[in-house]
Amino acid sequence: MAFPATRLRRLRRTPPLRDLVRETRLDPGDLVLPLFVEEGLGAATPVAAMPGVARHPLAGLVGEAGEAQELGLPAVLLFGIPAQKDEQGSGAWDEDGVVQEATRALKAAHPGLLVIADLCLCEYTSHGHCGLLRDDGAVDNDATLELLARTAVSQARAGADVIAPSDMMDGRVGAIRAALDDEGFADVPILAYSAKFASAFYGPFREAAGSPPAFGDRRGYQLDPANGREAVREALLDVEEGADIVMVKPALPYLDVIRRIAEASALPVAAYNVSGEYAMVKAAARDGLLDERAAVLEALTSIRRAGADIIISYHAKDAARWLRT
Ligand code: PBG
């Protein structure tokens, strides 16, 4: 008689049985859609490297967000592209800046949809780096903290539900938390891009947000892809400084990091399935090399299985549609 351990497939025989024993579920309620809003734009402008993604004018953005909400997505992550950039990135904390205006418009039109404001200076600085530059061209970490804190407060004042710093300056979560508390926003949570790697997979985003660094790269402040332990250390520091949710970015090449951080902290974990991950699937699907729906649902489920509670993905609307049918 055969040894019964060969009978694991008993649980795989029929769809209801497979569903019953499924360990990880993917739900539209886990997904967040990134959106780009550009000041002074006449009509939605497609991002060439990301089919299906566009930069929106304010009016179009509100419609796009409404669609996301109807599909069951709980939140959008908002990126702004200002009309003018300068050395400091002063458009980032302008009370009438592009993200502040967009946040007010979104909250007025869709009060039940969460607005997560991405907080970084790189879309607002003329040099494209994520902070103030010193004379030698390196980013001045401590001088940047005050600008980030000021930006966070202006985003909260505009009605942002969550502040998401993506700059990777040391000490920014503490600085932002203190400023929010001082200004009466103690209840506004921080989603920290804690383990943000210096990744080649951000290429298409930099086209979408108009934020490639004018010189050099971001390796001076983003994590080395080789370092998993250091990523855990970054996350634990953010937890100590007052983060409410910690994030790993990108997602698919860093599933081990998602798992380690989920085990090392008791906070909710988010993962950012970034522009390059999206572009790869789109390009392969366009050329008939992959079944887009199957590939995306498998990838998103795997990110959840690794330990992410929340997934930020440009495929969020598609996934929500596919999960319904
Ligand atoms: C920077 C920021 C980046 C992304 C989100 N916020 C790019 C970068 O660090 O260069 C990338 C997101 C993506 O690739 O989808 N503020």
Image (tube, helix red, strand yellow):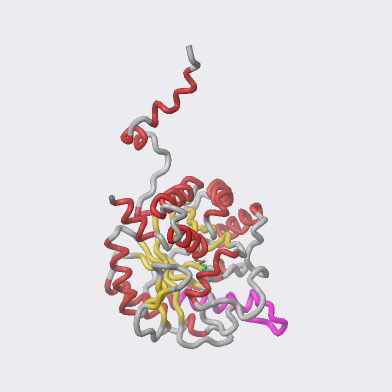
Give the residue at x 53% y 61%. 242
Asked if residue 119 is positioned above or below residue 69 in the image, the reply reads below
**Residue 244 appears anywhere in the view:** no
Q: Residue at x 63, y 71 (%)?
A: 218
Horizontally, residue 111 falls left or right of residue 143, namely: left
Does the segment drawn in magenta span residue 144? yes
Q: Is residue 51 above or below residue 144?
A: above
**Where 261 falls versus 198 (above or below)?**
above
Which is nearer the eye, 117 or 314? 314
Residue 138 position in % (x across, y down)? 69, 77
Q: Nearer the viewer, residue 50 or 180?
A: 50
The magenta region covers: 129-154
Quadrant of residue 137 in the image? bottom right
Q: Residue furthest front?
A: 288
Q: Look at the image and say whether residue 280 sits in the magenta stretch.
A: no
| Identity of the residue drawn at 50% across and 16% down | 3
Task: Residue at 48%, 23% (x, y): give it.
Answer: 6
- Where residue 116 appears, as percent x and y from the top left, is 41, 67
Describe residue 193's horizontal placement relative to residue 17 as left or right: right
Camera-side residue of 74 and 281: 281
Q: Position of residue 178 (x, y in %)?
A: 52, 70
**Residue 9 location (% of width, % of height):** 42, 28
Q: Does any portion of residue 261 appear in the rendered image? A: yes
